[in-house]
Amino acid sequence: MAKKPAAAATTITVEQIGSPIRREAKQRQTLIGLKLNKLHRTSTLEDTPSVRGMIEKVKHLVRVVDGQ
């Protein structure tokens, strides 16, 4: 059975604006999951509900640059 071609996935770009120092381990791991680990780094990710949930979890440490 042939698969349907995947639609062009939308992306979201996030920038780390807060330090993970003195934060809970879960928040540090969430930043790593978002491919962020240093201040002012940006990461372009696929816009999925799981990524949106991760951003919501550390919304005080990241900023959505585009893709809202």
Image: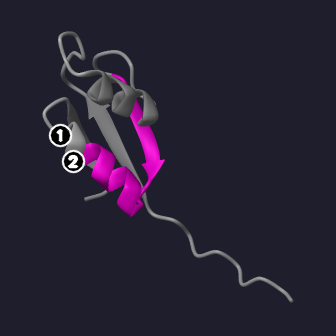
Question: Furthest-top residue in view?
Answer: 21
Q: What residue is shown at x 17% (from left), y 11% (from top)? A: 22
For residue 34, what is the image quadrant?
top left
Residue 62 lies, with reference to residue 41, above or below; the image says below
In percent of width and height, residue 45 lies at: 46, 47
Q: How busy is the neighbourhood of tag 1: few (under 14 within 10 Å), some, or many (20 plus)? A: some
The residue type indicated by label 1 comes to Lys
Circle 1 is placed at which residue position? 59
Q: What residue is shown at x 42% (from left), y 27% (from top)? A: 32
Horizontal placement of 16 versus 42: left or right?
A: left
Looking at the rendering, the stretch of residues picked out in magenta corresponds to 41-55
Q: Secondary structure at mark 2?
A: helix
Question: Furthest-bottom residue in view?
Answer: 1
Residue 53 is one of the magenta-drawn residues: yes
**Viewer-nearest residue: 40 or 58:** 58
Circle 2 is placed at which residue position? 56
